[in-house]
């Protein structure tokens, strides 16, 4: 079929486009504001992109319009629609659907879906889990909200048949615990399970569409203040996900999270495995970069790897517990993770100039910022960390969690905030940090502040969930 994707450059919709193209469909799409890595991936796939959401695209007449959640019925100040194409689709009575629904019907049906949900760490944990299954010879399909470095792409269909998935003997004799997929489909599919809403016409969380058999609940905090009123509203959506897991399925839950305990108290009808807490099914003993994996207190594997931070240690435990459900032993999982390469934009070194290292990281929620800084601190010891960040997510733009920013940055030696486009006073919020925090109204001013403060031996950690005005390249050029 021919599908035209509205909002194709989002990480989810871009991954969906890649899957559809791999499956043999004709794929076109439109969006506004494109930045790597998704734009690079779409161009490499030779997918035609149209800038904007003009109604003239109706002439493409695809078999179905796949609508991303960036699209709405919003109006401009002059009363004209912000997304004219969507209005034209509705007026024409054309066939349209959401991305998650299209994926569920055309890609996920008949497969063992392993879904990774949580406020933080979804992309990294999903990538870990996909790599574990790949390492075990299971050739999974996957859709990740980033680009896993072990694969170099954000999505793929996986082995074309169950027989193909078994053609390479699994490292530890991993076998499907159920009847397997329909003919011509991959046995396993690993997906990043987002709690954000599906589309303007479907306000359920994306993950309820996936019908997962193995579900990871990695953590749960308040986020997405633009669509959720409070934490309880998100907990209810997470329970909707739990409700879809069959009795033969497995729910893997972070035992350290009170919010997830409340979710499970609403009801759980599947096998339950916990991780993180001392009394969990899976726990860790040792530092995050080198630790023993314990299953119910008994050492079952050893993991030595390049990643740092307690958050990544917990991500690893979650992936190990999930992989066990499809027959991969903790020892085999740890062996795979020893070769795991982190996702792009997760503590990614963008360059070193005059002894100064510049990193790029996707952290934007205060807790993610804090754990990211903590991970770098554990790695570099007493060397200086210069944290450069922008509150870009809808939640942060609304100021819903601004009071947590000083706490999230307290392990950095200096912090630099890009405050452009905010409706709240960043200088006032960061005032408790004194001389350790500085605020800039635009990227050039920010680059100037950081360049003036930096000295050899420093580590500059840039954090944003967007392109950040290509600040990394500008810093490297200015520092040179």
Image: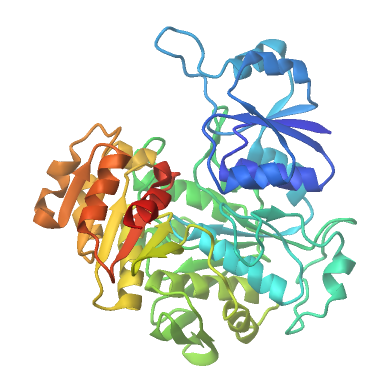
Q: Is residue 161 left or right of residue 125?
A: right
Residue 385 in the image: state x and y as whole percent: 27, 66
Looking at the image, residue 96 sits to the left or right of residue 1; the answer is left
| 130, 250: nearer the viewer | 130
Farthest residue in the bottom direction? 298
Which residue appears at 50% of the width and 85% of the height? 304
Name the foreground residue: 146 vs 353: 353
Q: Is residue 166 visible?
A: yes
Which picture quadrant has residue 133? bottom right
Quadrant showing the N terminus: top right
- The residue under the point 30% across, 41% down is 444
Q: Quadrant of residue 461?
A: bottom left
- Position in image of residue 155 (x %, y %): 68, 53
**In-image side of 151 versus 163 (left or right):** left
With 292 as the anchor, is 184 left or right in this view? right
**Furthest residue toward top:** 78
Kindly identify the residue that appears in the image at 30 percent across and 53 percent down: 388
Residue 333 image-quadrant placement:
bottom right
Seen in the picture, residue 136 relative to 105 is either above or below; the reply is below
Q: Is residue 97 above or below residue 392?
A: above
Q: Position of residue 398 (x, y in %)?
A: 30, 36
At 64% from the left and 43% from the top, the residue drawn is 14
């Amino acid at each position: 079929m021919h599908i035209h994707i509205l909002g194709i450059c989002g990480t989810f919709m871009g991954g969906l486009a890649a899957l559809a193209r791999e499956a043999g469909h004709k794929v076109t799409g439109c969006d506004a504001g494109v930045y790597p890595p998704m734009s690079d991936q779409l161009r490499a796939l030779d997918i035609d992109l149209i800038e904007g959401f003009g109604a003239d695209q109706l002439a493409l007449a695809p078999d179905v319009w796949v609508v991303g959640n960036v699209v709405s019925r919003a109006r401009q100040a002059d009363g004209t629609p912000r997304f004219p194409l969507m209005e034209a689709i509705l007026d024409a009575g054309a066939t349209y659907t959401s991305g998650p629904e299209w994926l569920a019907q055309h890609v996920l049906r008949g497969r063992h879906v392993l879904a990774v949900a949580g406020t933080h760490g979804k992309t990294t944990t999903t990538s870990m889990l996909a790599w574990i299954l790949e390492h075990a010879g299971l050739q999974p399909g996957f859709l990740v909200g980033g680009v896993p470095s072990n694969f170099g792409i954000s999505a793929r269909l996986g082995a074309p048949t169950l027989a193909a998935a078994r053609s390479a003997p699994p490292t530890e004799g991993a076998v499907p615990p159920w009847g397997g997929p329909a003919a011509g489909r991959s046995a396993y599919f690993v997906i990043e399970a987002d709690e954000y809403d599906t589309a303007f016409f479907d306000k359920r969380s994306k993950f309820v569409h996936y019908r997962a058999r193995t579900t990871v609940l990695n953590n749960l905090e308040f986020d997405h203040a633009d669509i959720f009123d409070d934490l309880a509203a998100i907990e209810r959506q997470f329970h909707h996900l739990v409700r879809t897991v069959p009795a033969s399925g497995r729910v893997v839950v972070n035992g350290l999270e009170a919010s997830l305990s409340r979710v499970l108290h609403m009801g759980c009808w599947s096998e339950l495995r916990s991780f993180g807490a001392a009394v969990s099914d899976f726990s860790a003993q040792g530092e995050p970069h080198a630790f023993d994996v314990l299953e119910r207190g008994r050492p079952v594997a050893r993991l030595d790897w390049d990643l740092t931070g307690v958050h990544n240690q917990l991500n690893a435990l979650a992936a190990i517990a999930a992989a066990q459900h499809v027959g991969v032993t903790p020892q085999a999982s740890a062996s795979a993770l020893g070769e795991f390469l982190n996702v792009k934009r997760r503590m990614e070194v963008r360059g070193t100039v005059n002894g100064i290292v510049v990193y790029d990281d996707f952290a934007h929620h205060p807790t993610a910022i804090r754990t990211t800084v903590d991970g770098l601190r554990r790695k570099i010891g007493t060397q200086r960390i210069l944290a450069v960040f922008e509150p870009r997510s809808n939640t942060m733009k609304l100021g819903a969690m601004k009071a947590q920013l000083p706490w999230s940055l307290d392990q950095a030696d200096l912090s630099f905030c890009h405050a452009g486009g905010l409706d709240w006073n960043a200088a006032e919020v960061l005032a408790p940090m004194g001389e350790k925090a500085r605020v800039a109204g635009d990227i050039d001013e920010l680059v100037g502040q950081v360049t003036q403060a930096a000295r050899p031996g420093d580590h500059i950690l840039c954090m944003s969930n967007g392109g950040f005005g290509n600040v990394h390249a500008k810093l490297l050029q200015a520092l040179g």
